[in-house]
Image (cartoon, rainbow, N blue to C red):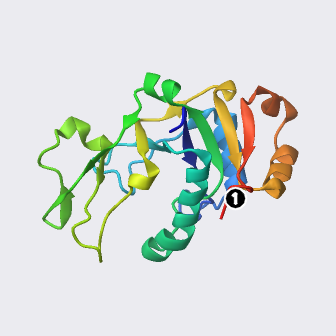
Amino acid sequence: MTTYLTHLTRSSSGKREGISEDRLDILIKILNDKKLIASGKGFINSGEPVVCLQDVPLYGVSQNVKHEMVINQSKYRRKRYEPIGIAISKEYVFSKGGLPVIYEKPTIQEGKEKFPNIPQELLWRVVSYDLSDMKAYIDWTHEREWRVKGDLEFSLSDVYVILSDNMMYKDFTKKVEPELIKELRGIIVLEGLMY
C-alpha cells in the first residue's frame, strides 16, 4: 500500500509531568530529539514500551484521523492522535526491529484480555481483534499497525513531516530553525485529503 509508515501525535493533556503541550510543540520536540519515545500504555497488551505506526497511504491517514475524531473520541473520551506527525520508510523501521502487529481474538480472564495462543515474547505485537459482538466489536485493522519495541531514533533526512493544513505549515516554518527544515526529507500537508 505504501513504502512509508506514519506516526501521528496529539496535544498532551497536561497529565505527564503536569505540563500541557501544543501538538506542534510536541512534533518539534520529536524532530529536535530525533526520536519517537515508546509508550507501554493504552492498547499495548504486554505493557512493554513500543512505538506505534500506521501502514496506510496518505488518504488512509486522513480517514483514520477523521475516524479517530468522530468515532473513537466519543467511544474512548480522548483523542489518540491528530493530523500531525512524521512518516518514515518501512525499510528503516524494519531495520530497527519494527514489525506488523498480530491481530488476535482475546479471551477474558480475571477481567483482562489474555492471548493463550501467543508466546509471551510476542505480546508487544498483539492487537485485540473481535467482530463477534457488533455492539462491542474491536477492530483496529484500518490502521494496519506496525510496532517497534522501545524508542525509535532517526535522522531528519529519514522523515517527512505531516501537517494538517496550510495554517499549521506556516506556524511550523515560523517555529523551527530553517536548518532543520532543510534536513527533512520533505513536508506533507493533508488539507486536500481530509474529510
**Image vertical order of residue 73 relative to residue 15, above or below:** below
Is 116 in front, or is 19?
A: 116
Q: Secondary structure at mark 1?
A: loop
Residue that mark 1 sits on: 22
Identity, as a three-letter code, of the amino acid under mark 1: Asp
Q: Is residue 112 visible?
A: yes
Quadrant in the rendering for residue 137: bottom left
Label 1 crowd (10 A; few <14 / some 14-19 / many >=20): few
Residue 128 falls left or right of residue 118: right
**Residue at the image point whose x is 42% and y is 40% from the top:** 146
Residue 131 falls left or right of residue 33: left
Quadrant in the rendering for residue 157: top right
Estimate the x, y position of residue 14 in percent, counting from the top left.
59, 64
**Residue at the image point whose x is 57% and y is 44% from the top:** 57
Is 37 in front, or is 86?
A: 86
Quadrant in the rendering for residue 23: bottom right
